[in-house]
Amino acid sequence: MDVVHIPEEGLTEREAYEAMKDLPGFDLDEDGWSYTVHGPDGLHRIEGVRLNDEILEHERFGWLNVSHAKRLVEGAAAQTLPISDGLKRNLANRPVDPGRAAGMSLAKRDTPILMIMGSDGVHVIDGGHRVRRRQSDGLTTVDAYLLRAEALPELRVRRYCRGSTGRWESRNTVSDRAFAIEVNGAVQFAKRMADAHQ
């Protein structure tokens, strides 16, 4: 999984626009939720993201808009959860930058993580380094926001390329069909969990 900042971390949406507006083929849609830009293999279209939003490539969901997920939970109360074996397994295959976790401020370490329901349980979509830092500091809990599976379509980022064929071709890492199956499975999993706790 890779996290990508477009075009660079820390810019406002306006600064990102100024940095990108002169790129060949750059065009921002009126609603601000998609844009096109020329790449080495043709014209690229990215949908479901504002300029400089943070996106995450997830093996089950494809590209997700982490910045939009953060906007969705603004004002909500985080839950305190144990750093369980399940959470550790969820993060086991994620790449870690030990320097990033070690150099993290306490305020950043204590910022709630973002999780979303998948067809096989809950997945961390933002905060893996914070969990690892909390573990290394001897802490056994983490504050978290849990997004419902129904938020997945709203968080999905879609990518297309129009190359030499002149047709738009999907560059999504998860097909529309696989994504729909995953969302349906996540909704069903959440329903089973809710039923089990009644």
Image (tube, grey):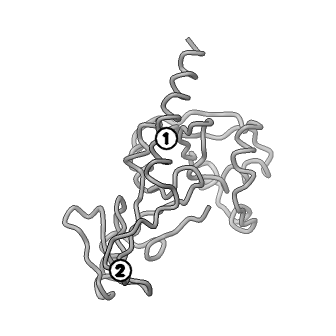
* Callout 2: SS: loop
- Classify the position of the C terminus by image quarter: top right
The amino acid at mark 2 is Thr
Of the pair 184 and 110, the residue shown nearer to us: 184
- Looking at this view, name the residue that lies furthest to the front: 165
The correct choice, above or below, for 2 with respect to 43 in the image is above
Looking at the image, which residue is at 21% across and 61% down? 31
Residue at the image point whose x is 44% and y is 87% from the top? 40
* 13 relative to 59, above or below: below
Front position in the image: 167 or 149 = 167
Going 34% across and 64% down the picture, which residue do you hit? 50
Q: Name the residue under label 1.
A: 181
Q: In this view, does 74 lie above or below 34?
A: above
Q: How far apart are marks 1 and 2 (CA)?
A: 30 Å
Say whether residue 58 is left or right of residue 36.
Answer: right
Image quadrant where residue 119 sits: top right
- Give coordinates of residue 25: x percent, y percent: 29, 84
Coordinates of residue 72 in the picture (x, y in percent): 39, 45
* Quadrant in which the N terminus is drawn: bottom right
- In depth, the one of 58 and 95 nearer the eye is 58
Residue density around tag 1, few if under 14, some if 14–19, many if 20 or more, within 10 Å: few
Residue 101: percent from left, percent from top: 71, 61
Q: Which mark is residue 30?
A: none
Q: Is residue 126 above or below residue 95?
A: above
> Sequence-wise, which precedes: disc 1 or disc 2?
2
Residue 131 percent coordinates (x, y): 69, 49
Residue annotated with mark 2? 165
